[in-house]
Every structure is written in C-alpha cells, then in structure tokens.
Amino acid sequence: MADGSTLGRRTLAHETLLVLALSLGASAVSALISFIGSVTAPGPLKNQAATLVGSQAPGRPWLDLAWQVFGVATALVPVLLVAHLLTREGVGLRSIGFDLRRPRSDLAWGACVAAAIGGTGLLLYLGARGAGFNLTVVPESLPAVWWRVPVLVLAAVQNAVLEEVVVVGYLLRRLDRLGWSAGAALAASAVLRGSYHLYQGLGGFVGNMVMGVVFVLLYRRWGRVGPLVAAHSLIDTVAFVGYALLAGKVGWLPT
C-alpha cells in the first residue's frame, strides 16, 4: 500500500479534484446553474420551490421505492471511493473518525450540535425567504405510503454520511497533505458546502456555509466526523419527517 506522503502533491491534488467532480463538486455546479435559472425566472424566489426528496414515479409506489433506494445507494458510491483511497494509504475511514469506536459519544455530541444548529437554521431560512432571498424549500413530496418515513430517514443519513465524510474528513485530510493552511482549508470546505446548497437560494448558501465553518472547527477539535454525521442525520431527519407531519397543518411553515 502506498502512503499518502509518497503519492506526490500533483497526484493528491488530481485525486481530490476527481473525488469532488464525482460528488459534491458536481452538485455545486448543478446548484449554481439551478440558482441562475431561478433568479432569471419571472416572479420572486419565494414563489418557486426547491424539493429535496421528491417522488420519482408518481402513482407507482413500488417503482418509486426502487428509485428511492437506488438513489440513496448510488449517492454513497463516493464514500466507498474515499474509503478505498484512504485504505490505500493504510489508514482507512478510521483516520477521519468514521467508525463505531465511540457510538454513544458520537450520538450524544451529535444531538447537542443538532439542537443548537437546527432551530437557528430554521429561523435563518424563514427570514431569508421572507426577505426574498430564498426559494420555498419543500423537504419532501413523497406519497403517503408505508415506506415514506423510512426512505426519508435513509435520505437524511445518506446526506450526512456523504457530506461529512467527503467535505470535512476527506477534504481536510487532503488539503492538509497539500500544505494548505488551516484557515484556507476551513474556507474551502465551508464555501463548498454552501455552494451545493445554492439551489435553495442565498439563504441556503449562507446558512450552510456557516454550518460548514462550525463543523470544520468541531472536527479539528474532536478529530472525528462521527458526531457530525450524527448531527447532520438528526437535522435532516427532523426536517424531512417534520415537514411530512406538519405541512399544511401549521401556519408558520411555508409549503
């Protein structure tokens, strides 16, 4: 197995760019194109919708379920690629703290982070939408069938694993090896996180960039993405399932 230090800066840089191009870097470009389309469309942004988990086969629940599971599985392929690349170094995902060594601690700290960020994020979204800087975010639009909640939970966990492993653990490890300063690496990770949420509007961009700064600082302190995956999973699960339960039933939640 080749140690990361023997691969050379150019090889590491190319590897990092390819991982991002196959995952969240591509999502950032897609989000930018979507945002340009939204701001150039007639009418205010808040009258447009950004759906996060939508039906892939309306009226055909079993086919829809197959597409949902397929989407979750394929979205996690970049995580498997990162696992392969880190294993090639002889360290594996354990080097970024994505393992089961501290499940209770990771979950406890993750719950604390989720509680602190979740409410603040909701207020920022409502404020940005009210000011006309954000689209109306529709967390889910799945049919009311038996697999609705399980799929929403799976989607939440998939988002968390993909983002925290790639944008925090892997990216920071690679940028450190490439000689980036801690501040520059933090900025790159946070801006990337904000960028692939730009399809939601400027509120989504700024809110997730701030979240990215917090997550990088916590990762530097703990040396583990485990608590971040737990926090992100909880935040998205509450958003997805909460919307499914409350949409149209409370006045403060835009639909």
Image (cartoon, grey):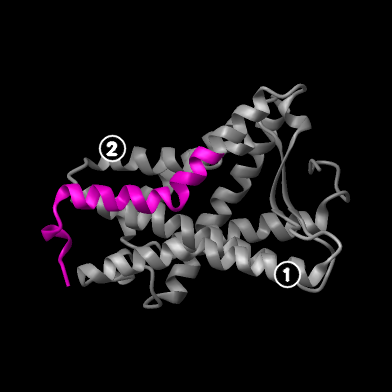
Q: What residue lies at 79% left-to-right and 44% top-to-bottom? A: 253
What x and y, as percent, mark residue 244? Answer: 79, 58
Q: Which residue is mark 1?
A: 65
In the rendered image, which quarter is residue 57 located in?
A: bottom right
Q: Position of residue 231 (x, y in %)?
A: 52, 59
80 or 106: which is nearer to us? 80
Range of residues picked out in magenta: 1-30
Q: How dense is the environment of label 1, judged by Cα within 10 Å: few (below 14), some, or many (20 and up)?
A: some
Q: Secondary structure at mark 1?
A: helix
Q: Separation of disc 1 and disc 2 at Cα? A: 41 Å
55 vs 39: above or below:
below
Q: Amino acid at mark 2?
A: Ala
Q: Would residue 124 be seen by someone viewing this image from the given angle?
A: no
Q: Going by the image, does 110 lie left or right of 89?
A: right
Q: Which mark is residue 228?
A: none
Residue flagged by tag 1: what amino acid is it?
A: Leu
For image coordinates 79% across by 40% down, the residue present is 254
Mark 2 sits on what residue?
184
